[in-house]
Amino acid sequence: MSKIIITCAITGSIHTPSMSPYLPVTADEITAQSIEAAEAGAAILHLHARDPETGKPSAAPEHFMAFLPRIKQASDAVLNISTGGSAVMALDERLAAPRAAEPEMCSLNMGTMNFALYPAAERIKDWKHDWEKPFLENSDDLVFKNTPRDIATILRDLGQTRGARFEFECYDVGHLYMLRHFADRGLVDPPFFIQFVFGVLGGIAADPDNLMHMKRAADKLFGGDYAFSVLAAGRHQIPLTTMAAAMGGHVRVGLEDSLMIAKGKLARRNADQVAKIRRIVEEVGRSPASPDEARAMLGLKGADRTAI
């Protein structure tokens, strides 16, 4: 109960450069903000890549490798590489970097879903890049494909073959049952690290009652074999992560999930969000886990067994 894992999601693939001048895009920016977030108390860094010229989400191994070794050299944080990439990418494209890096940890989306970003386009007047507006607007006809075959491929390629453990991203209750299905098939073993995801249009809403419902369902399905963490999009980030901390769960913050540090105020660094949630969790009696404590809690293989 006392130790809490703080994850920081540094840049993601949802927000676009026109939304905030502080969103890290280049390898230098991602490296610097990752190191700062780790120094502020993040035990896990959840990492996506961007094309440094345009800020567009990228799954290219060369874009990941421009910052992964530098972060590893400067920090002992767990490097958690996305297998979600962007919803517009094919599976092999999404998996190119984690297959090459063989990280300790990867994210894994546990179901196919609508992933609607188009309301965000209405709030932006000046666009930095031509790709941004259609990227957001066309999400009204976008399906984020994560079929059982896709999930099994990731579990085998990155888990069984390369020894990665997973941040199981569950955007709705049905995703918890999908994880139970794969556990019953023997493709994944406990302890399960389950990320409850709230507030994405197409997934479960960011409501305290829904957090309680997800927790009850996970208790029923996994008993004592799991730990849960919470991320919530936008303005819901701090209220729901605070609730998770009080419930004995873990927390995720970062500019992937929210660009703000307070109402109407952009976060200038990922580390600012980490520092804020760290203050809150310490005030409710929790102590941030170190990276090595997180490794022990989640059964990770260790940074020395990666290809980074």
Image: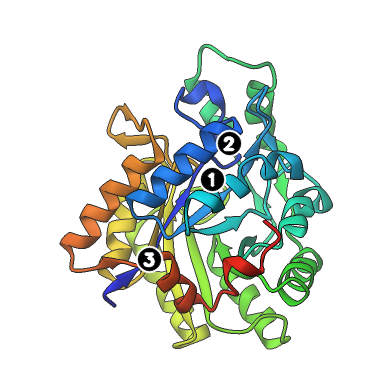
Kindly indicate whether the residue at mark 3 contacts the one at mark 2 (C-beta within 8 angstroms): no
Q: Amino acid at mark 1?
A: Leu
Mark 3 secondary-structure assignment: loop
Q: Amino acid at mark 3?
A: Ser
* Residue at the (50%, 19%) spot, across then down: 124
Q: Position of residue 270 (x, y in %)?
A: 40, 40
Asked whether 276 or 32 is in front, the reply is 32
Q: Which residue is mark 3?
A: 290
Q: Around disc 3, counting alpha carbons within 10 Å, would you say few (fewer than 14), some (14 to 19), or many (20 or more)? A: many
10 lies left or right of 48? left
Q: Position of residue 138 (x, y in %)?
A: 69, 30
Camera-side mark, 3 or 1: 3
Which labelled disc corresponds to residue 201? 1
Q: Amino acid at mark 2?
A: Leu
Q: Around disc 1, counting alpha carbons within 10 Å, would you say few (fewer than 14), some (14 to 19), or many (20 or more)? A: some
The quarter of the displayed image where residue 273 is located: top left
* Residue at the front extreme, as displayed: 73
Q: Of label 1 and label 2, which has the lower sequence position?
A: 2
Cα–Cα gap, marks 3 and 1: 33 Å
